[in-house]
Amino acid sequence: MNTHEGDFIIPNFQFNSGEMLPELRLHYTTLGTPKCDDDGKTTNAIWIGHGTTGSGHQFLNENFADELFNAGQLFDSNQYYIILPDGIGHGKSSKPSDGLRVNFPKYGYLDMVRAQYRLLTEHLGVNHLYLAMGTSMGGMQSWVWGHEYPDFMDFLFPLASLPVEIAGRNRMIRKMIIDSIQDDPDWNNGNYDAQPRGLTNALHLLLMMSSVPLQWQKDAPTRQQADALLAEKLESYASRMEANDMIYQVGASEDYNPLPHLHKITAPLLAINSADDQVNPPELGLMEDAIQKVKNGRFILLPITDETRGHGTHTLARLWKHHLEEFLQST
């Protein structure tokens, strides 16, 4: 599977906060080659947005890429132009840990989508998307794409998300994550030499937020196994997290609220969540009400099975790709 990586530099990028960054770097990975029709309209481009703390590279694995991008598969990279960007503050794109620390401009999802629109149109030469899709934060940004650029895509596919303001338990946990870091004296207003101890408390909350009760019980049915699994997960998270970056990443959702704008979405939209998703628990009933406001919207709730992985079900393409294929073929 051939990939290409690059960077797009936007000079003097103005954030919605009013702050400006002299050079905003957006890193990206692509597969395939763009195609256009006789009128010059891009026909085969697919934007895929990653989750909070993630990067575009998270999709280049056996559970996602090997289910979707190989020859003969749904998004065969010989036929489609697949764009996997790193959002602002993530991966190899500009972020606080590059040097500015807490002097980095405050960014939100609207900034992230607007920057990626410029990446597509000004740098990659993509003037239309066949599909805008994403997982978790990328799923939420798919809704934003739909109401901010309603004529820019043929289809929308948000996974593991809700098109409502981040509030209730979701917001409380996010604020606890941020407070766990900022309230630690070791954080030192962002000017630390070693990762502050508060980052571990933040990771505890992040683990609870994305926990999978059924699978974790199966994977750790004894006290000793549970303690070992927790230690393993904490070590994995800590190896790739940075405290200042995490504050910004978790806080970026503060400007997110598609609900008042859902009537602007015109592209056919399929939303899929999993019933064991602790971030977007189905008992809230929020999606059922919201999807009615989307002119061409559909919603599928995957039942809990031995294969689902809570919020992380979005990474297991084998569990939902048939629903997406049926949706694209029937619309």
Image: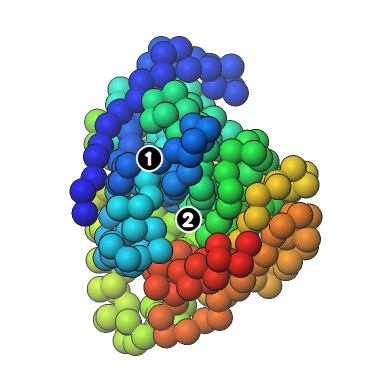
Above/below status of 147 relative to 267: above
Mark 1 or 2, nearer chain start: 1
- At a point 37% along the width and 45% down the height, the residue shown is 81
Left or right position of 293 against 224: right
Give residue 318's position: percent from left, percent from top: 39, 73
Farthest front residue?
38
The residue depicted at 45 percent of the width and 12 percent of the height is 12
Q: Amino acid at mark 1?
A: Pro
Question: Residue 245: horizontal and vertical position, in percent?
Answer: 38, 37
Q: Which residue is mark 2?
A: 135
- Residue density around tag 1, few if under 14, some if 14–19, many if 20 or more, within 10 Å: some
Where disc 1 sits, the SS reads loop
Closer to us: 190 or 146: 146
Left-right relation of 264 to 31 = right
Where residue 36 sits, quadrant-wise, is: top left
| Residue topped by disc 1 | 34
The reply to whether residue 186 is visible in this rendering is: no
